[in-house]
């Protein structure tokens, strides 16, 4: 059996959902061990066990919480030396990208990122990666051992199998040379409204909204529908709205019942984060925009007129 | 202070990608300096203006990538280095990071600035690899940067806000596209850029061999496409149609 590792990302003691999604896939590929580092690692190990991890390597040193990438790279590299896994799975998230990139360079192996699926083939592993702007899917074979693959969040459905993992203390010495990028403060800016990832309806705005001053129109519609507001990378980059609202490859992945894309052209960067939505409605001035080709309903028109009218109609319908 | 900014020439994000029947990208697509890298250059120039020093642009790509470097030089960067070698065509992240590291190391920069991710690939894997190969810490996804003596402090964008992250020079930082509004090149800047040095080097100069690729593409399949729906012109009835779809989806 192939030896598979899942890097179980923790945020201040909280196991990230991506870890459990990766567990579901890893179980299909071989014997699964997870690595959980930082506060809460032992508690996370119990959960990981229920999701199919036979062994969880833990270390609760606070250095893993407070310093970017380097302590985790040290621990994984040390464990790799002793255990030589065939495949290491990471979530395609900011924190895991930092660790995976560093680890791959240290081990002198390649990595495959932005994967939507992983399959075992010919004694190795292939990742399915969007290609040519998302028009194609490339099957990329990892030629090195370990194979390192980063998988987009929400690519797999997490499910419990009801096992218990053996918890092993991972011996790691985190020296001063790895305590260099120090997180000294954490600031939460997100509002208390409906969470984007959990919303049943998501209304996202892009450049076609004309400017940040028009985003309250989307907020009003989201309010009427009980949904959340997202955005394209272009408008986040332009500083119209915070990154917390970004939907897409390097933002959040969502799969709501209804996704309404307003003034968004539909670049791959955006669509990989929302194309799993059940129903997609697009409102755009350009009938040729790529988003129109994937929408269940595409409306060619002026978003700034349609959105307020829609909000009023939803309110009237709901009474 | 010596600042290196990595820059990349990418297909113009504002032009439409055309996929030819043989699975290659349309050749006549315009190429531009990655818009995210313009922000990185701007941040580098602002740090130089505040603390003195030099801004060096390092790129990897075909000969024409000099245009991207030249644009950065016309914004005010001091000089450029282009790693160009036929063997680098289709280089993966590891090879890219190795080549960049080999070109940057002799410069012994205080700060290396990278975009968080390129506009074309958007995978953001080269910067952490580069930091490891340079042996420096990485302060990533910065939307704000402050330098005080040898201490550097950034605001690191997170999914629900930001973290304040502190480190010491030398360091690699990745910056978000929103970090600084890139300046326009002045006429004087454009003139001055013409005589600025762009050093071109190959893999041999760096002592790197391409080696076996870390990943190979075994096959390409058509992406799963969603069933095409209907497209309507808003003639005043669009709202009714949307309401109908929302009702069918049982969200109202």
Image (cartoon, grey):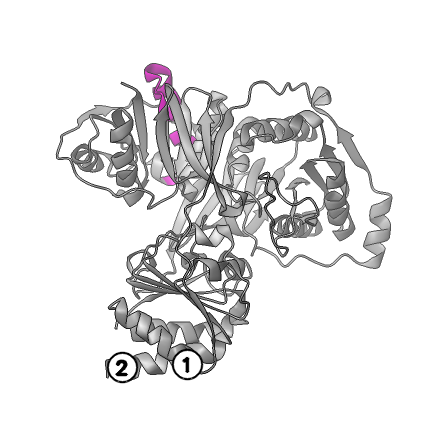
Nearest the eye: A42 or B129: B129
Residue A316 lies in the magenta-colored region = no
Q: Residue at x 26, y 30 (%)?
A: A28
Q: Nearer the viewer, mark 1 or mark 2?
A: 1
Where residue B39 is drawn, which disc sits there? none
Identify the chain of the residue marked 1, using the numbered disc in the image.
Answer: B
Dividing the picture into quarters, in which one does residue A318 lie?
bottom left
Instruction: Report x, y in % for residue A163.
Output: 13, 31
Residue A317's disc is 2
**Label 1 CA crowd tier, 10 Å (few <14, some 14–19, many 20+):** few
Q: Is residue A16 visible?
A: no
Label 2 sits on a secondary structure element that is: helix
- Marks 1 and 2, how far apart at CA: 16 Å
Number of other residues with Cα within 10 Å of mark 2, as a class: few under 14, some 14 to 19, many 20 or more: few
Tell me residue A92's x, y (percent): 41, 41
Dot 1: element: loop
Q: Is residue A10 left or right of residue A266?
A: left
| Type of secondary structure dominating the magenta stretch | helix
Pointer 2 indicates a residue of which chain? A
Left or right of A220 in this view: B250: left
Task: Answer above or below: position of A81 versus B104.
Answer: above
- Can you identify the residue that label 1 sits on? B237
Point out the stretch of residues depicted in magenta. A66-87
Question: Picture quarter containing residue B5?
Answer: top right
> Picture coordinates of residue A204 (x, y %)?
42, 64
User: Does the magenta-highlighted stretch encompass residue A75?
Assistant: yes
Same chain shared by disc 1 and disc 2: no
């Amino acid at each position: 059996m192939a030896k598979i590792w899942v890097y179980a990302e923790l945020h201040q003691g909280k196991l990230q959902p991506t870890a459990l999604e990766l567990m579901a896939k890893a179980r299909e590929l071989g014997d699964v061990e997870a690595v959980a580092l930082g506060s809460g690692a032992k508690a996370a190990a119990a959960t990981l066990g229920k999701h199919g991890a036979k062994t969880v390597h833990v270390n609760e040193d606070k250095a893993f919480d407070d310093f970017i990438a380097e302590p985790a790279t040290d621990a994984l590299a040390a464990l790799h030396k002793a255990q030589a896994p065939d495949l290491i799975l990471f979530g395609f998230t900011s924190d895991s990208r930092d660790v995976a990139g560093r680890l791959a360079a240290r081990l002198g192996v390649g990595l495959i990122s932005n994967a939507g699926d992983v399959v075992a083939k010919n004694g190795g592993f292939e990742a399915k990666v969007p290609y040519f702007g998302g028009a194609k899917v490339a099957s990329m074979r990892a030629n090195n051992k370990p194979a390192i693959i980063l998988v987009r969040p929400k690519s797999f459905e997490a499910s419990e199998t009801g096992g218990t993992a053996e918890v092993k203390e991972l011996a790691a010495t985190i020296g001063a040379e790895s305590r260099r990028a120090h997180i000294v403060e954490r600031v939460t800016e997100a509002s208390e409204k409906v969470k984007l990832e959990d919303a049943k309806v998501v209304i996202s705005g892009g450049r076609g909204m004309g400017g940040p001053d028009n985003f309250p129109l989307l907020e009003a519609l989201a309010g009427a529908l009980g949904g959340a507001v997202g955005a394209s990378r272009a408008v986040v980059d332009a500083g119209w709205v915070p990154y917390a609202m970004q939907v897409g490859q390097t933002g959040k992945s969502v799969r709501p019942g209804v996704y309404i894309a307003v003034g968004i052209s539909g670049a791959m960067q955006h669509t990989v984060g929302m194309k799993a939505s059940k129903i997609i409605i697009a409102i755009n001035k350009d009938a040729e925009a790529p988003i129109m080709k994937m929408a269940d309903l595409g409306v060619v028109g002026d978003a700034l007129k349609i959105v307020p009218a829609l909000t009023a109609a939803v309110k009237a319908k709901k009474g | 202070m010596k600042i290196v900014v990595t820059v990349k020439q990418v297909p113009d994000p504002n032009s439409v990608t055309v996929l030819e029947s043989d699975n290659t990208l349309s050749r006549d697509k315009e190429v531009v300096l990655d818009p995210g890298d313009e922000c990185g250059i701007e941040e580098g120039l602002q740090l130089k203006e505040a603390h003195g020093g030099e801004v060096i642009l390092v790129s990897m790509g075909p000969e024409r990538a000099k245009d991207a470097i030249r644009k950065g030089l016309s914004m005010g960067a001091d000089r450029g280095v282009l790693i160009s070698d036929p063997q680098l065509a289709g280089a993966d992240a590891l090879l890219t990071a190795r080549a960049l590291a080999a070109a940057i190391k002799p410069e012994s920069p205080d700060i290396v600035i990278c975009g968080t991710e390129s506009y074309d690939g958007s995978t953001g894997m080269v910067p952490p690899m580069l930091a490891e190969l340079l042996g420096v810490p990485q302060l990533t996804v910065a939307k704000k940067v402050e330098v005080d003596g040898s201490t550097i402090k950034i605001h690191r964008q997170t999914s629900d806000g930001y973290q304040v992250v502190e480190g010491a020079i030398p360091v690699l930082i990745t910056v978000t596209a929103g970090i600084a509004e890139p300046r326009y090149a002045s006429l004087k800047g454009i003139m001055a850029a013409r005589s600025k040095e762009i050093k071109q080097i190959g893999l041999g100069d760096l002592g790197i061999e391409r080696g076996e690729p870390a990943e190979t593409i075994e096959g390409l399949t058509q992406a799963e496409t969603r069933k095409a729906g209907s497209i309507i012109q808003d003639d005043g009835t669009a709202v009714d149609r949307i309401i109908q779809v929302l009702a069918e989806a049982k969200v109202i």
